[in-house]
Image (cartoon, helix red, strand yellow):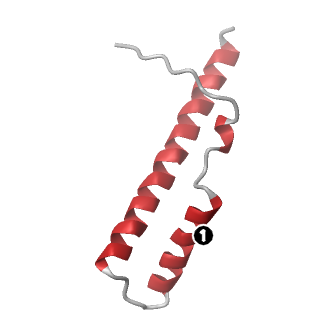
Amino acid sequence: MTVEIEMPEGWEKFRLPEGLHKRLHELLDRQDQGQTLTPQEREEAQGLVDMAEWLSLLRLHARRIVGEAAQHP
C-alpha cells in the first residue's frame, strides 16, 4: 500500500520550536551537570527528544522524496 503525503511549504525548517528546544537543552544540561531530574522532568526530556528525532526523520524522508521527484519529473 502506498500513501501519498503532500509536504507543506517550509518542510525543510521543521524543528522544535525555540522554547521547546531551550527547555530540552536546559534539562539535558542539568542532567549533564549531575543534577537529578524529577520523574516528570525525565519524562518531559524524553518526550522532547522523541519529538526532535521524529522531526529529523520527517525532514530526511521529505528530502528523499523531493530528491526522487527531481530525478523523475
In this view, which residue lies farthest toward the left? 39
Q: Residue furthest bottom?
A: 34
Q: What residue type is labelled 1?
A: Lys
Residue at the far top: name it: 73
Q: Residue at x 64, y 36 (%)?
A: 11
Q: In which quarter of the image is the N terminus?
A: top left
Q: Dot 1: what SS?
A: helix
- Residue 35 position, x and y percent, is 42, 91
Q: Which of 65 and 21 is in front in this view?
A: 21
Q: According to the image, label 1 marks what residue?
A: 22
Q: Residue 3's quadrant in the figure?
A: top left
Q: Residue at x 50, y 42 (%)?
A: 57
- Would residue 39 be found to the left or right of residue 6 on screen? left
The one of 36 and 65 positioned closer to us in this rendering: 36
Q: Which residue is drawn at 39% across and 60% down?
A: 47
Q: How crowded is mark 1: few (under 14 residues within 10 Å), some or many (20 or more)?
A: few
Q: From what the image shows, is residue 70 above or below residue 26?
A: above
Name the residue rendered at 43%, 91% in the picture: 34
Q: Would you place residue 54 above or below residue 65 in this image? A: below
